[in-house]
Image: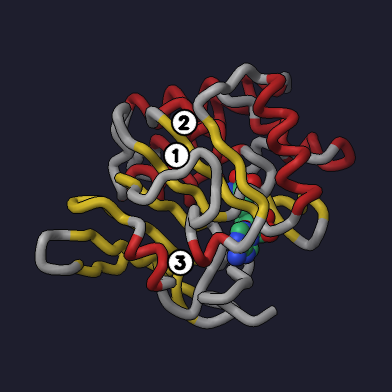
Amino acid sequence: MRFEDQQKKMVERHIKMRGITSEKILNAFLKIPRHRFVPDQIKHLSYNDCPLGIGEGQTISQPYIVALMMDLIDIQPEDKVLEIGTGSGYQTALLAELAKEVYTVERIETLLTRAEKLLNEMGYNNIHYKIGDGTIGWAGGYPACSKFDKIIVSAAAPEIPESLIGQLATSGKCIIPTGSRFYQELLIVTKNEEGYVTSYHGGCTFVPLIGEEGWEK
Ligand code: SAM
């Protein structure tokens, strides 16, 4: 089957039929060719609903979980979104379709360089890139930005880094897998005038968020 047909089937079966009904999200998944973000030797697996190795011991996330996380925090066209864990850049492209601006941080330089090159080739001009420790958020990134409407973390932490809460705008939402090294739950932190409220949204398994306010290694 052609990649295009496999992509349509993946969106229908693994995203829409599992309860993601937002047209904006479904259209973004139909637009972004996941196979361009997957290494050559496993491109044939690109439209399976599972994480895949992208080198450096890291993975491109499972499509359904990416869709779920974006749906849960309700990305809006005017949002400034901070993404922690660029990885292949696939989710970055999806976010760039849905939001006004995306600020993405990756700790592994080779991954960030590869993702940035591909996303530039694809014509995105609303993405800003930073190499470094995303547990401290966008601190020191260019252009400077101190508050984000949404923060999406694609690696697992023992708990939400305080720095990320500090960089959420009032009414902003951060979604992050939190728990042990091997099993986590999706935590949403919503900022309000008084502080913040938290809610949990089911189990998942992500690679570790390594850094000052995450796992040590
Ligand atoms: N969503 C990405 C995609 O679509 O390809 C996959 C992200 S992958 C599951 C998690 C990424 O988080 C890895 O590339 C890893 O290097 C990165 N990471 C882990 N700790 C980090 C940190 N402290 N700061 C920034 N990136 C980090």
Q: Residues within 10 Å of mark 1 (few under 14, many from 20)?
A: many
The residue mark sitting in front, 2 or 3, is 3
**x and y, in percent, of residue 41 in the image:** 89, 40
Q: Secondary structure at mark 2?
A: helix
Quadrant of the drawing holding the N terminus: top right
Q: Secondary structure at mark 3?
A: strand
Does ligand 1 reach within 8 Å of label 1's beta carbon?
A: no
Q: Give amino acid for label 2.
A: Glu
Q: Quadrant of residue 32?
A: top right
Which corner quadrant of the figure contains ligand 1?
bottom right
Residue at the image point whose x is 55% and y is 36% from the top: 128
Quadrant of the drawing holding the C terminus: bottom right
Which residue is under mark 3? Answer: 177
Q: Earlier in the sequence, mark 3 or mark 1?
A: 1
**x and y, in percent, of residue 139 in the image:** 49, 57
Which residue is under mark 2? Answer: 12
Which residue is outermost to the right? Answer: 41
Residue 5 higher or lower than 115, as above or below: above
Q: Give amino acid for label 1.
A: Ile
Which residue is under mark 1? Answer: 15
The residue mark sitting in front, 3 or 1, is 3
Residue at the image point whose x is 10% and y is 67% from the top: 194
Relative to residue 73, is residue 54 drawn left or right?
Answer: right
Q: Give amino acid for label 3.
A: Pro
In space, the residues marked 2 and 3 are separated at their CA atoms by 25 Å
